[in-house]
Image (spheres, rainbow, N blue to C red):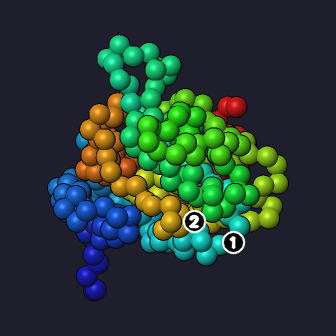
Amino acid sequence: MAHQESPSLALIPRVRTHYELRGFSPVAIDMLCDEIHERSSDAGMRTASGRWESIDRLLDVFEPIEQSPQPAILHPEPVAIFGLSFGYRLDSPFARFPKDRRPGKNNEALAKQLERCHRIFPDARVAVQHEIGLALESPAPTGEPNERAHVEADLLSPARDWTTTEVLSYFIKNLPDKVFDKSRSILVVSHVHHFGRCAFILSRAGFDPLIAPKEAVAYSDYDEHEAQPRFRSSWEYLLNDFLSLCKTSPSAQNLADPQTAPPR
């Protein structure tokens, strides 16, 4: 009888490939794979919370998918530009949430990237998450040209701690009708390590996620002053991302299903 490989041993290569394609450091990926090995058996994988996840289900979640789409410059008309925020700042321990929520350096950098993308594709609809919207509305720092007045978002999400799926769902459902009749191509402006997650969700829902052209300059830094710990370092974000994906369904997500739409 042929030897059958343990499902737990098959999971680690898939997870490694997934995060290598998303640009995480080899050291951080090795740390994650070591954790998976220690916590896995044929019965499943035990998370930090004590929850057991089926290895067979995780193999479906991390099945090979396209993580390196063509640059948007190769697509003449992406119909929309989505700006996904990367955390936020609360400058005081007594700050009121969400009234005193601030973009922080992560979202200020992403707002600049979105501005460049909008100059390249001025006819695309623009949907941005709350913190990027705040950065777009704020005046440019002294000595820098104020380009923010040239970008007016067609859609701004509420100041809520939504998952990536909820944000993308909100954008797709609340942009004007028939935006996606012409094309399913969406240019995604996000942190380098976040883009793969956005592409993962959009691709499985039948959309064509486009990575920003090189002229827009990718953003890959972290901010130690972020209000949420997972946005302070690449390791914290990697671990959180993995645990979040472990909880998702491997089936295609229908972002256009009104039953799952976040409230307007």
Query: Residue 152, relative to residue 264: is it above or below?
Result: below
**Front residue of this view, candidates 71 and 1:** 71
- The residue carrying pointer 1 sits among few (fewer than 14), some (14 to 19) or many (20 or more) residues within 10 Å by Cα, namely few
Residue 204 coordinates in the image, percent (x, y)? 58, 62
The label shown at residue 210 is: 2
**Front residue of this view, candidates 65 and 51:** 65
The answer to which of marks 2 and 1 sits earlier in the sequence is 1
The label shown at residue 255 is: none
- Which residue sits at x=63%, y=55%? 118
Q: Residue furthest bottom?
A: 1
Residue 255 coordinates in the image, percent (x, y)? 65, 50
Residue 17 coordinates in the image, percent (x, y)? 34, 70
Q: Residue furthest front?
A: 143
Where, by quadrant of the figure, is residue 79 drawn?
A: bottom right
Residue 190 coordinates in the image, percent (x, y)? 48, 52
The quadrant of the picture occupied by the C terminus is top right
Cα separation, mark 2 vs mark 1, equals: 11 Å
- Which residue sits at x=47%, y=71%? 68
- Which residue sits at x=30%, y=61%? 24
The quadrant of the picture occupied by the N terminus is bottom left
Marks 1 and 2: in contact by CB < 8 Å? Answer: no
Q: Secondary structure at mark 1?
A: loop
The label shown at residue 76 is: 1
Left or right: 146 in relation to 245: right
Q: Is residue 133 visible?
A: yes
Query: Residue 5, relative to residue 140: is it above or below?
Result: below
Q: Is residue 167 visible?
A: no
Q: For the residue marked with disc 1, what is the amino acid?
A: Pro
Left or right: 47 in relation to 138: left
Q: For the residue marked with disc 2, what is the amino acid?
A: Leu
Q: Secondary structure at mark 2?
A: strand
